[in-house]
Image (spheres, grey):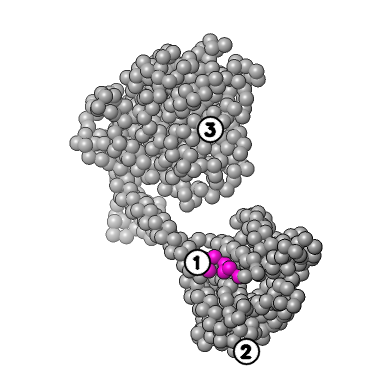
């Protein structure tokens, strides 16, 4: 406030002919508020009740608000009689016990019922007055008119409920959208055991992980697993584009490096402005190997975490594809490839970094699960199967709890041993 | 799941003595009993607990499915009796918990030496068809839910992380004002419906254990005729009317309430 409120002795100006003594007199005249008047005409309701709630004293303001005469209330009615029935229930189950236990309670929203049946929203604060021996004597209550505030709170509550509904709707939409980005069930590949899992870290946003496994010409199969940078609708659009580009490109030329090069070109064309969109992808071409049994797989990687091979003999290793660059960033990304033989009993695991980047303590600490731990995990698991691997990864993710803060996609393929191999 | 943690069970008093189990009603938690516990501790083993969803119970154990009716709470009481293995207990149920005691005793009478029904009501809603007067209508209960809503504005945003995030440090929750009566608004709303919309009038006759019906003078929630109704329907019951006013005699008149519980439970041997 900028107006002068200082010492009356400092007052000068047009009214300066009145001395300080006059000022004082006028001031005290103004304040000639008896304590009684201050109580009766205060801008809030005052109520004193006995410990059982019976009204012992009430001020004129509250009587005015309610339209009662003093004699209607004092000694005749209880505080809870002034409340709506719902308010009375709240009073008996919350207000009164808390007041007893704490000696005071403040800012409780209740509604009073006036003599004419109308309702007055109030904010209630009560304290227990105790005697010199600490024994409770009576309850003092102040009541503030809360019509405006209640209207505002109702609006807040309504907005919150609406927001809750919207969030539920959005979650449903996200989950549905996420499902459309993934194959419903892994394809049934002759001579191969396939399992996959998608862990959704947050239902509030669509994640950008994706995978697929699909037939190509003459007994060969294509598979891919990738991770689009970012989350939400924009990432989902890239995911969708990446998925159909990969499938179409693989039909045109199934060489894995060529497939990823085509995806790189498409992403570069699509997002060449200020909003670059990129992803990491591993693409594999599976070809049956009649001589040695099992399959040959050529993997091309664009900046993606290496696949983990868990062999029939119980060993496990990453299949490194060093130098592979992110897809969608550079016009000519370098794609790294590697070819291995998947023998009967071998299992190959592809994963996104949601798994290795997971916090191992649910408190959200800096400890990440990491590549080494995943390798040890694979060594502990081998030899295994596709469903065995995915089951173990799901258990692992469960053990991280809320530590998994990014979506995680895992795809496992396993070459089953034939019956005669098992006998050997 | 350990029921002691789930229900924040506290066992106090004299070991080996007859057991009194105190069950709080809708609204607050086991702190409701703190004024009567000192008087009971001398002669009884006293078991206190929070209903799931209230006080320092494990909120994660709450589900709409289990606690959408009194049955979940009744199961909890029976599970606690089994797990604590203290022998038959005198179950003191305040308000809605009185009916939990009625249902539990009907289901497993051997677990109970007796029942104390403190300010009980088997049905809060009026039933004009039978002339039963519980004192309330369905619309009144909606109004209560509004009251709950209006007074839980600050809960979910600001308070929930404080309360939910520190289950291992309940004292943090304890220091908060109004914490005895504070819980998740969703849970409070469901518990309010269970409390005020259940009708257990038909279950009273199945009680076969000695029962004390203790009603208050001038109780805005459970009027005298409701106490009389409960007494009339439970075969082996006695009715006392406490001088205490209001719905919470354990707070309004702790000595009188403790004396009534002690006299009844003590006489059961």
Q: Nearer the viewer, residue B228 or A54?
A: B228
Q: Which residue is mark 1?
A: A178
Tell me, yes or no, whether dots 3 and 2 are on the same chain.
no
Q: Is residue A352 left or right of residue B163?
A: right
The residue sitting at 40% across, 24% down in the picture is B203
Q: Quadrant of the N terminus of chain B?
A: top right
The residue sitting at 45% across, 24% down in the picture is B102
Q: Main secondary structure of the magenta part?
A: loop
Q: Position of residue A222 (x, y in %)?
A: 60, 77
In space, the residues marked 3 and 2 are separated at their CA atoms by 66 Å
Neighbour class for label 3 at 10 Å: few (<14), some, many (≥20)?
some
Q: Quadrant of the C terminus of chain B?
A: top right
Chain of the residue on which disc 3 is drawn:
B
Q: Is residue A412 left or right of residue A31?
A: right
- Vertical relation: A252 (above or below) A403: below
Which range of residues does the magenta coloring cover?
A182-189
Instruction: Choose mark 2 or mark 1, whichever is in front.
Output: 1
A252 falls in the magenta region? no
The residue sitting at 38% across, 27% down in the picture is B200
- Are the two marked residues, 1 and 3, in contact with CB atoms closer than 8 angstroms? no
Q: Position of residue A421 (x, y in %)?
A: 76, 65
In space, the residues marked 2 and 1 are separated at their CA atoms by 30 Å
Instruction: Identify the disc placed on residue A332.
Output: 2
- Vertical relation: A229 (above or below) A424: below
Q: Residue furthest left?
A: A116
Q: Residue furthest bottom?
A: A332
Q: Which residue is mark 3?
A: B76
């Amino acid at each position: 406030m900028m107006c002068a409120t200082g010492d009356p002795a400092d007052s000068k100006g047009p009214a300066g002919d009145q001395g300080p003594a006059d000022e004082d007199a006028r001031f005290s005249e103004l304040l000639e508020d008896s304590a009684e008047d201050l109580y009766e005409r205060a801008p809030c309701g005052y109520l004193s009740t006995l410990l059982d709630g019976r009204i012992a004293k009430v001020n004129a303001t509250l009587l005015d608000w309610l339209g009662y005469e003093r004699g209607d209330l004092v000694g005749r009615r209880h505080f809870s009689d002034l409340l709506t029935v719902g308010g009375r229930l709240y009073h008996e189950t919350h207000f009164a016990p808390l007041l007893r236990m704490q000696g005071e309670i403040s800012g409780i929203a209740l509604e009073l019922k006036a003599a004419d049946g109308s309702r007055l929203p109030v904010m209630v604060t009560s304290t227990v007055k105790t005697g010199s021996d600490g024994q409770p004597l009576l309850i003092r209550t102040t009541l503030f008119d809360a019509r405006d505030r209640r209207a505002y709170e109702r609006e807040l509550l309504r907005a919150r409920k609406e927001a809750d509904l919207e969030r539920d709707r959005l979650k449903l939409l996200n989950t549905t959208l996420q499902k459309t980005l993934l194959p419903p069930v892994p394809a049934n590949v002759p001579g191969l055991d396939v399992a996959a899992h998608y862990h959704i870290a947050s239902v509030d946003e669509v994640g950008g992980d994706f995978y697929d496994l699909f037939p190509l010409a003459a007994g060969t199969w294509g598979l891919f697993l990738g991770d689009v940078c970012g989350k939400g609708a924009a990432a989902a659009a890239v995911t969708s584009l990446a998925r159909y580009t990969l499938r179409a490109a693989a039909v045109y030329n199934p060489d894995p490096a060529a497939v990823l090069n085509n995806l790189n070109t498409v992403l570069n064309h699509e997002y060449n402005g200020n909003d670059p969109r990129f992803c990491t992808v591993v693409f594999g071409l599976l070809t049956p190997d009649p001589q040695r049994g099992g399959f040959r797989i050529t993997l091309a990687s664009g900046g993606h975490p290496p696949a983990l091979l868990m062999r029939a003999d119980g060993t496990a290793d990453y299949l490194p594809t060093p130098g592979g660059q992110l897809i969608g960033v550079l016009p000519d990304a370098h794609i790294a490839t590697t070819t291995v033989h998947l023998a009967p009993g071998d299992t190959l695991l592809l994963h996104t970094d949601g798994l290795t980047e997971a916090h191992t303590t649910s408190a959200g600490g800096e400890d990440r699960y990491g590549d080494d731990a995943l390798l040890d995990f694979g060594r502990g698991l081998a030899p295994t199967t596709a469903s065995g691997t995915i089951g173990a990864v799901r258990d692992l993710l469960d053990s991280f709890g809320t530590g998994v803060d990014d979506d995680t996609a895992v795809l496992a393929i396993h070459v089953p041993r034939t019956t005669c191999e098992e006998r050997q | 799941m350990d029921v002691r943690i789930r229900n924040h069970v506290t066992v106090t008093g004299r070991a080996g003595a007859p057991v009194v189990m105190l069950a709080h009603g809708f609204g607050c938690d086991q702190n409701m009993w703190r004024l009567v516990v000192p008087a009971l501790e001398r002669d009884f083993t006293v078991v206190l607990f929070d209903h799931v969803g209230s006080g320092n119970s494990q909120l994660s154990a709450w589900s709409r499915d289990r606690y959408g009716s009194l049955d979940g709470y009744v199961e909890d009481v029976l599970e606690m009796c089994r797990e604590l293995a203290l022998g038959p207990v005198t179950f003191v149920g305040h308000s809605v918990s009185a009916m939990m005691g009625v249902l539990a005793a009907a289901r497993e009478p051997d677990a109970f030496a007796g029942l104390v029904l403190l300010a009980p009501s088997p049905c809060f809603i009026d039933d004009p068809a039978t002339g039963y007067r519980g004192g309330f209508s369905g619309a009144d209960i909606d109004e209560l839910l509004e009251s709950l809503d209006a007074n839980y504005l600050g809960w979910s945003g600001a308070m929930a992380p404080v309360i939910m995030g520190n289950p291992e440090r309940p004292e943090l929750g304890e220091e908060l004002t109004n914490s005895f009566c504070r819980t998740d608004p969703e849970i409070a709303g469901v518990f309010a419906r269970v409390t005020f919309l259940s009708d257990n009038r038909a279950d009273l006759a199945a009680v076969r254990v000695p029962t004390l019906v203790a009603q208050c003078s001038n109780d805005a929630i459970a009027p005298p005729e409701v106490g009389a109704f409960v007494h009339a329907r439970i075969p082996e019951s006695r009715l006392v009317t406490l001088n205490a006013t209001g719905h919470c005699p354990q707070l309004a008149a702790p000595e009188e309430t403790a004396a009534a519980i002690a006299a009844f439970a003590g006489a059961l041997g």
